[in-house]
């Protein structure tokens, strides 16, 4: 896969600035926060991957990230954190 802003296309720790609405983000980072029939037509924002660990079959074993998303060019934003801990069985 092609690099995104000089970073690998896989999610590795780091800050991904200038994110646009996924899947219309081209070669740049993508972001899409939606639900309950609501979403944005135009998205800008950023996200920071703090930790990302995939298990042996590629499942998400650990993932920590923060994000900020602006809709329709507005100054207000949705922001949040994602924490996933899914250790292998055993």
Image (tube, rainbow, N blue to C red):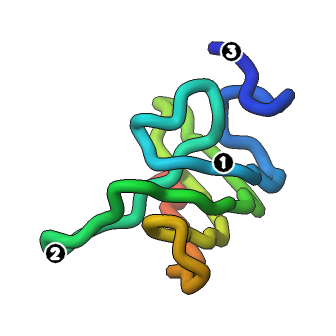
Marks 1 and 2 sit apart, C-alpha to C-alpha, by 29 Å
| Quarter that holds the N terminus | top right
Marks 2 and 3 sit apart, C-alpha to C-alpha, by 33 Å
Query: Is 61 situated above or below 66?
Result: above
The disc placed on residue 20 is: none
- The secondary element bearing badge 1 is classed as strand
Give the camera-side residue of 19 and 72.
72
Q: Which residue is mark 3?
A: 2
Q: Residue at x 47, y 30 (%)?
A: 57
Mark 2 Cα-neighbour bin, 10 Å: few <14, some 14–19, many ≥20: few
Asked whether the viewer can see residue 90, the reply is: no
Q: Residue at x 29, y 66 (%)?
A: 39
Marks 1 and 3 sit apart, C-alpha to C-alpha, by 21 Å
Give how far across and how far down residue 69 sits, in percent: 55, 69
- The secondary element bearing badge 2 is classed as loop
Is tag 1's residue or tag 2's residue first in the polypeptide sequence? 2
Image quarter of residue 67:
bottom right
Left or right? Give the position of 4 relative to 41: right
Q: Which residue is mark 2?
A: 36
Give the camera-side residue of 35 and 76.
76
In the image as oriented, which residue stretches furthest toward the top? 1
Q: Which residue is mark 1?
A: 53
User: Mark 1 or mark 2: which is in front?
Assistant: 2
In the image as oriented, which residue stretches furthest toward the left? 37
């Amino acid at each position: 896969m092609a690099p995104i802003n000089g970073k690998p296309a896989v999610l590795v720790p780091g800050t991904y600035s200038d994110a646009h609405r996924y899947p219309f983000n081209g070669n740049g980072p993508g972001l899409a926060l939606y639900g309950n029939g609501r979403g944005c037509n135009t998205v800008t924002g950023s996200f920071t991957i703090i930790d990302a660990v995939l298990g042996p079959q590629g499942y998400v074993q650990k993932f920590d990230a923060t994000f900020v998303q602006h809709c329709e060019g507005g100054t207000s934003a949705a922001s949040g954190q994602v924490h996933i801990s899914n250790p292998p069985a055993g």
